[in-house]
Image: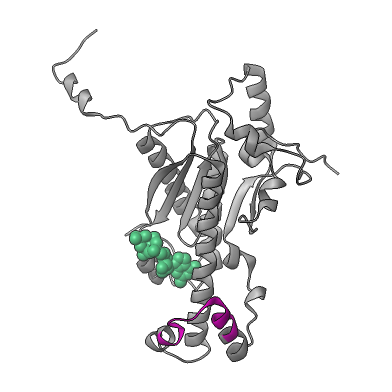
Amino acid sequence: MANSKFEYVKQFEQPDQLLPNTWVVVRIDGRGFTKFSTKYGFEKPNDKRALDLMNAAARAVMSELPDITIAYGVSDEYSFVFQKSCTLFERRASKLVSTIVSTFTAYYVHLWTSYFTDIPLSPPLPSFDGRAVCYPSIQNLRDYMSWRQVDCHINNLYNTTFWALIQLGGMDATEAEQSLKGTFSADKNEILFSKFHINYNNEPEIFKKGSVIFRDYELVEPGTHNVVEEVEKMAEPIQQSKSQAEKDKKKRAKAPIVIEHLDIIKDDFWDRRPWLLSNKPGQIPKET
Ligand SMILES: Nc1nc2c(ncn2[C@@H]2O[C@H](COP(=O)(O)OP(=O)(O)OP(=O)(O)O)[C@@H](O)[C@H]2O)c(=O)[nH]1
Ligand SMILES: [Mg+2]
């Protein structure tokens, strides 16, 4: 072996392994999107093109990385979840995060013109940061997802009311901010309805709930699968036979990747889709 005198520098590479037997979430977030959204004239408070572009980039990440079981996005952020017992292709945090960030960014730039047909990108180009967090239990993971969706709801209700006061009510930003100070959700709903005849419930689901991306199989009856108990008692990834792993891979590749705007806080979403937490692909719906 030809060791050069320079090789000692390898010792400076320190391990940054993600904890085994945990749910790994990689969250990416647009850098300086307040400025970026102004530059490209994003509609306020929600720009459908911008959200569709985020979703398209996230879907591309999911189809390139089949280890991701579910992703959730809102505004300029996306969370990608790796199932705890999946044999993660990369356990080094920095490599995993950089793979997701660069794949996402590449697709965001590549797909830009499909969504913003009349404004080409110019420097400074969009970029994203990312972090990986390990969650030890399904409850922790569910609470993480709920946290992001509650955040989406709180921000969207605030922004919808704030921009209605400005765009429809003729206020300036300071006045709008002042009139929302100390208000609760019910107050904002009331302002929207009494002043602008807007029923918040009728706002688009994509704005109210954010977007969830996952592989779609046949829904199951709630209560027929006990995934939580099964998965929580697993101490290490199941050693699959090669043929079983091949079968699962094929099933996964066949399953359509869907983008929905559903409630992911309540049990129902998870109970009907046991494959999201179990790492076992579901039934491919029979073609009709
Ligand atoms: N107008 C408009 N702006 C959006 C939309 N989605 C995201 N944004 C902007 O993106 C920002 C995202 O928030 P942050 O991530 O906290 O802000 P940031 O400027 O990206 O800052 P860093 O993430 O810290 O770099 C929002 O505050 C908005 O300004 C949209 O649909 N319409
Ligand atoms: Mg940001």
In the image, 277: left or right of 100? right
The quadrant the N terminus occupies is top left
Residue ID at (49%, 69%) = 155
Residue ID at (45%, 30%) = 20
Question: How far from the left and from the top, in percent, is residue 273?
Answer: 69, 44
Tell me where the magenta segment starts and ends, as one range.
178-190
Q: Does residue 169 lie above or below 28 as drawn?
A: below
What is the quadrant of residue 192 in the picture?
A: bottom right
Residue ID at (44%, 72%) = 41
Q: Does residue 2 lie above or below 229 as drawn?
A: above
Farthest residue toward the left? 5
Q: Is residue 187 magenta?
A: yes
Residue ID at (39%, 48%) = 130
Farthest residue toward the top? 1
In the image, 50: left or right of 12? right
**Figure quarter occupied by ligand 1:** bottom left
